[in-house]
């Protein structure tokens, strides 16, 4: 799968690009998803999907994927340009925690700084995908539909 960044922009009131994710949004805190907002979606966007992935996690799955998936959310209508904090709307996939919904950063103690990539994907068709898809399953389904994407990267380190 190959994707290229678009002009769409993603931001959060919780942290700046490259900034530290507040503990409220981590497994050590309240473990609630941060607010996300995007703009400049490509013309023709019919829906969105959101993923949070930690490529710094020292894990490789049998299927060859790496890192740790913290959030998979999809079937988001094109009219939506913001997810509120602690978002429970739309359709949740299965994170690497083995459950639906957001699971915040919580890297191993002493493992250093991890980078958390919050991705928004703009899709050229509205989707009605079933709940519970993993990140890999979602990407297999939506790859032909992606017309734009971008990311917001936050960091977190356990002391």
Image (cartoon, rainbow, N blue to C red):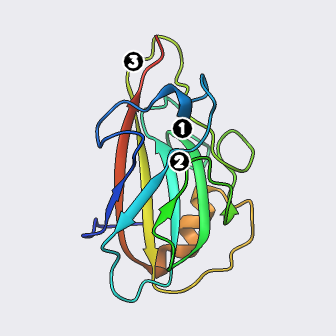
Sequence-earlier tag: 3 or 2: 2
Instruction: Say which element carries label 3.
Output: loop
Residue sitting nearer the eye, 42 or 4: 42
Q: CA distance from mark 3 to mark 1?
A: 18 Å
Q: Label 2 near label 1: C-beta < 8 Å?
A: yes
Vertical placement of residue 24 versus 51, above or below:
above
Is 134 situated left or right of 124 in this image? Answer: right
Q: Residue at x 62, y 44 (%)?
A: 62
**Is 73 on the left-hand or right-hand side of 94?**
left
The nearer-to-camera label among 3 and 2 is 3
Mark 2 — residue?
Answer: 64
Instruction: Report which residue position mark 1 lands on.
Output: 60
Residue at 48% over, 63% down = 82
Q: Are marks 3 and 2 in contact (CB under 8 Å)?
A: no
Give the spatial CA distance, label 1 vs label 2.
6 Å
Q: Which image quadrant: the N terminus?
A: bottom left
Instruction: Using the image as rendered, state which of residue 60 and residue 46 is in the foreground.
Output: 46
Above or below residue 50? Residue 98 is: above
Which residue was labeled with disc 3? 112
Q: Which of the two marks, 3 or 1, is nearer to us in this view?
A: 3
Q: Position of residue 124 (x, y in %)?
A: 46, 85
Sequence-earlier tag: 3 or 1: 1
Element carrying mark 1: loop
Provide residue 68's location: percent of width, then percent of height.
54, 39
Residue 148 vs residue 36, the one in the foreground: 36
């Amino acid at each position: 799968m190959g994707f290229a960044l678009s002009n769409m922009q993603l931001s959060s009131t919780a942290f700046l690009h490259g900034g530290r994710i507040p503990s409220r949004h981590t497994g050590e805190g309240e473990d609630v998803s941060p607010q996300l907002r995007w703009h400049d979606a490509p013309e023709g966007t019919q829906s969105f999907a959101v993923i949070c992935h930690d490529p710094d996690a020292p894990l490789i799955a049998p299927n060859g994927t790496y890192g740790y998936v913290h959030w998979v959310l999809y079937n988001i209508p094109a009219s939506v340009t913001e997810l509120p904090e602690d978002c429970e709307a739309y359709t949740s996939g299965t994170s690497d925690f083995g459950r639906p919904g957001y699971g915040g950063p919580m890297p191993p103690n002493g493992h250093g700084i991890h980078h958390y990539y919050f991705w928004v994907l703009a899709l050229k068709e509205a989707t009605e995908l079933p709940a519970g898809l993993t990140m890999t399953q979602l990407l297999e389904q939506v790859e032909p539909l992606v017309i734009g994407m971008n990311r917001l990267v936050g960091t977190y380190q356990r002391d």
